[in-house]
Each structure stands twice: as C-alpha cells, then as structure tokens.
Image (cartoon, helix red, strand yellow):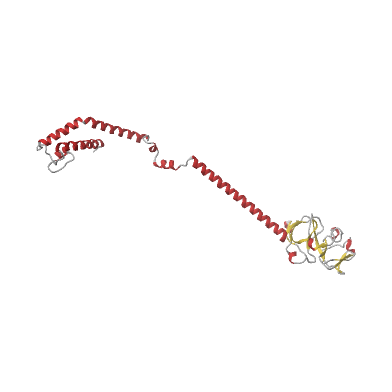
Amino acid sequence: MGKYEEVEDSLEFCKDIDFYEMAFHEEKVNDRKYPHLEEYIHENDKSEKATEQESTIVEKLTHHKNNHSTGVDNVIKLVEYQEEQSKKGQGNHKADPVTQLPKEEVKQEKSKPSKKTSKKTEEIEEEKELNSLTKEIIRLVCTLLVAVAIVFSVTTFLGTYTRVKGSSMEPTLHNKDMLIIDKLTYRTSDPKQFDIIVFEHSKSEWYIKRIIGLPGQTVQIKDGKAYINGNELKDSYGLEPMDDAGQAAEPIQLGEDEYFVLGDNRNDSADSRMEYVGVVKRDKIIGKCAYRFFPFDSFGKIDHK
C-alpha cells in the first residue's frame, strides 16, 4: 500500500469510527466490533444479506466520503507537495544546512577548533618553545660554568700548559714547543735535581730551566764547569763549557727553600748565574714539565735524566 492510500485509509478509518458510533450508539454489531464497516461487509460478502441498518450506514459513509473528498484530496495534495519538496531537497542537498555535508564532513566541521581556540593553542605552543629555549640556554650556561670550573681546577691544582720562548733549553727543548706542566707532583713531593721546572720570574713572565742545586747545597762555577758541594757536576746536558760564571763564580749557599737553575744551552741562557734571575724560591715554582704535545712529531714525555 502506498503512502497516499495509507493517509486516505487513515482518514476514512477515523470517519468510519465516528459514523459507526453515531449509527449504533456504541452498540455491537453481531457481538463484534470492526474498525472499518465497509471492509467488514466486503470481507464477509454480506452485500445481499445486509440489513437495512447496515445499508443506511453504508449510504451515510459513502455520502460522508463524497462530501469530504475535497478535504482528503487537499491532504493528499499536501503530502504529494511535501514528498516532491523532500525529493528535490535530497537531490540538491538544500533541505537542511546540516544535510548539505556528508556525515564525515559534518564531524570534521564539528572538530575544527574555533579561532579563539587556535590562538590559545598557538600561544601555548609559543610558550612551550620559549620555555624549551630557555631551558636549553640555562643548560648551556651550566655546562659552560662546569667546564670553566673543571679547567680552573685542573690548571690550578693539577696542571697547565705553556710555550717555550727562545733557545735557552736547546737541545732538549726548542723555541715554540708546547708543554704540559704537572702541578700535582710538587704538592706531594719536593723538586729533584735535573728536573725541568717552570717558575715565575715576574707576574707576567715564566722561565723554564733545569734544577742543578738543591736546598742546603753549595753551588759554584769555575773553569766553565759547575761544582756541587765542591764536587764537579757530571751531567750530559751542558755540552759546552760556560763562558760566564756570573754571580756563581763565588760559592752560593742555598737556603732551605732555594734552588739553583741553569739552561741546557748554558752560553745562551738567563738563569741563576744572573743577579736579575738569581736562585729560585720554592713558592715560585709552578710545576714540572711533563709532556710536549707540539710539534706533534716530538710529542711525548720529557726526559729529566
């Protein structure tokens, strides 16, 4: 049954009930109630056996239907119009603003953030980036501070480096050699004879020399040779006799914290023979020359014997 027939049948059903009640005053017909009297007569084939009352009711129903056909037609026309508009709306997707988009698109439209939400999200992201950058800067600064502290600790207590200037220590050391200075050794032990040391000549200048005389010894230079406590110094560093004995021409008695130093290239060295250098105090010694790291072909431990 089509939609129009259902609507017409529903309307007729309502009218039939109304006239059915008017005709019988809510009495039963053959002890049974039927919602549609015409259908009852048709189904039971009682057209020939119908009573006068039943015929009268049928006539009234027919008359009522004919009189009200205009209203039914109007209803049907209204339904047809709505059906037609509904079909057009489904074809053009204009019936409802929401139906213009498929379900997936509607969900996507709902999930799109508003402009305010987008701005807040952007601000949050920018704040996160700023915080991350700040953390990186802080981490970098902390790393630099730690590195500086380590370098300071190492150069103060463990070691440092220096560069040779001049030829006073040839052939052992050469001009522009880069050296690592061991500071730790002399914190736990005293300097020894023939050690190559770095000491402070002035606040802006360091000297590199070899220890010849130790605290308490007597040093003297005569006939181009060095004597310790009156005994000739046997070493392989000074290859030539010393031309200038300087202040060591007379015996020099070293104090408890004093050291007498010479350069290996003794005829081209400013050392303890000169008054402006003199003997070296213990507290002026910076450290012991431990390694040469430049030039690379001469890299290695420095020989002190």
Residue 96 image point, x, y percent: 37, 36
Residue furthest front as drawn? 25
Q: For this view, does 198 lie left or right of residue 3?
A: right
Q: Quadrant of the N terminus?
A: top left
Q: For this view, does 18 lie left or right of residue 166?
A: left
* 291 or 183: nearer the viewer: 183
Residue 142 image point, x, y percent: 64, 53
Q: Quadrant of the C terminus?
A: bottom right
| Residue 245 visible in the current orientation | no
* 168 or 273: nearer the viewer: 273
Residue 236 image point, x, y percent: 82, 65
Quadrant housing residue 106? top left
Q: For this view, does 138 lie left or right of residue 224?
A: left
Q: Residue at x 18, y 32 (%)?
A: 64
* 131 or 161: nearer the viewer: 131
Quadrant housing residue 4? top left
Q: Residue at x 74, y 64 (%)?
A: 187
Q: Residue at x 28, y 32 (%)?
A: 78
Residue 188 image point, x, y percent: 73, 66
| Residue 131 visible in the current orientation | yes
Q: Residue at x 64, y 54 (%)?
A: 143
Quick check: 122 above or below 282? Answer: above
